[in-house]
Amino acid sequence: MDIQFVAQIDASADVVAFPVRKGAVETLGALLGAAAAQARFDGAAGTVAETAAIDDDRAKRLLLVGIGEGNVHDLERGGAALTAKLLTSGVASVAVNFASAGTSDADDVLAFALGAKLRGWRIDTYRTRLSDKAKPSLTTITIASPHGDLSARWAEASAVADGVALTQTLVAEPPNILYPESFVERCRHLADLGVELEVLDERQMKALGMGALLGVAQGSVRPPRLLAMRWNGGAAGAKPVVFIGKGVTFDTGGISLKPGPGMDMMKWDMGGAGAVAGAMKAIAGRKAKANVVGIVGLVENMPDGNAQRPGDIVTTMSGQTVEVLNTDAEGRLVLCDAITWAQKIYEPEVIVDLATLTGAMVISLGHEYAGMFANDEGLAAQLLDAGTASNDKLWRFPLSPAYDKLIDSGIADIKNIGPREGGSITAAQFLKRFVEDGVKWAHLDIAGMAWHDKDGPTYAKGATGYGVRLLDRLVADNFEG
């Protein structure tokens, strides 16, 4: 989607959109006011009404786009609604007249533009019989803004949208196309942005003692990978912020096999890894003045004759032993070795991990919030603020030694699953055992957020891109010089 900014709309534009605040319909002219009245349009965020007009024997298509109260999320939703309305309409370009919005703030214009670009993502790779009417037609949005040249600021916002799109694509790809090795290849282009890539293969991980991660992978013909993506935009020698993502590219549950219905959706069990990759693209794309490392543990969890068994005991890179009681509680086994490796190599002060970790989190929060666990009040507050600002919302859950006894093993140091109650909390408590003293750490359980079965504010149903804007905002607000 090409988004341009101009001082005023070209008179030749035949499709024109007018952003309208809620309650400001009375400020529109007679024609647009009548169109609003007929459609019961009141400017609510994300609503669209339209009419037509004749100008010198030329028909013009006029759209009213609701931007609600005019806050940043309402503006993004308005931009997204415009794209959704026109994406496959046959219209190739639309001009947006921001004079109707009653705002003089460049941030408002940029928020509207960002929403418009975010909503333009689609994956049509495997659609061979799309009718012409179903194919995307909208390619250009031209926004008339009185704020001069917005290209530099838009380049930063656009880079974040590109990061979200990468995550959506990774999450949406089928598991025969996206697996550990191909995930790495999909991230190679980050090197062009200045990101340093390091890839560990199965042999290297075995030498490091990553028995937990490798145990998950041993049932698949697809070899595992650990990918580290490093962006050095901050002070030389300053410790990086580390993001770690669960990358189970397909999760059958292993020997603890999942039910067949819905198993196809386990292609998005790498949503945490996808979010980390997208965040690294966003951070590097806008040249963030911070040192950031993204690490993803990539495996496929399959049930063959060599697969890990319930009852197996594995030794993690940290030296702690884990009794594997359920092979479908595999994400924490991947993450614990990645967390240990990150601390050994980068000595970070801050780690945030993201994972589609537990179905219990979906039961708790549905598809409105991701769950957050943190061992540091300051980091928790920073993440909550970043979630509010980015609209990647978070809800904090407790950590407590009282839950530790639920995952104590009678034969090893720890077991990989506790009782049914408190399932998301015991998973977080498991990970906490691998975090070294003095390291600020947060665990984000995004099981309900990586994929939605209905349209959201800035995305169509399917892959949401959740987590990219959250992590980018966390860095921008707290870790840039």
Image: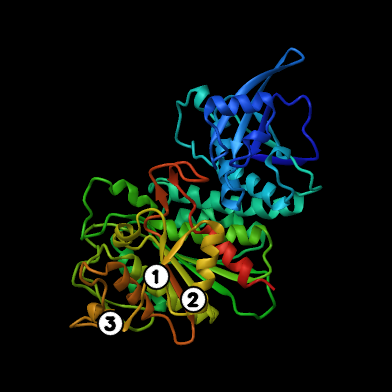
Rendering coords of residue 405 (x, y %): 24, 82
Spatial CA span between label 1 and label 3: 22 Å
Residue denoted by label 2: 342
Going by the image, does 205 lie left or right of 310? right
Do we see residue 204 in this rendering?
no
Among all residues in the image, which is located at the extreme front? 26
For the point 28% across and 46% down, the residue is 262
Mark 1 neighbour density, 10 Å: few (under 14) some (14–19) many (20 or more): many
For the point 61% across and 32% down, the residue is 64
Quarter residue 357 falls in: bottom left
Residue denoted by label 3: 402
Residue denoted by label 1: 335
Rendering coords of residue 26 (x, y %): 64, 34
Location of residue 447 with respect to 335 vertically, above or below:
above
Spatial CA span between label 2 and label 3: 27 Å
Sequence-wise, which precedes: disc 1 or disc 3? Answer: 1
Asked if disc 1 and disc 3 are in contact, CB closer than 8 Å, the reply is no
Do we see residue 27 in this rendering?
yes
| Amino acid type shown at disc 3 | Ala
Quadrant in which the N terminus appears: top right
For the point 26% across and 62% down, the residue is 328
Sequence-wise, which precedes: disc 2 or disc 3? Answer: 2
For the point 28% across and 57% down, the residue is 302
Mark 3 neighbour density, 10 Å: few (under 14) some (14–19) many (20 or more): few
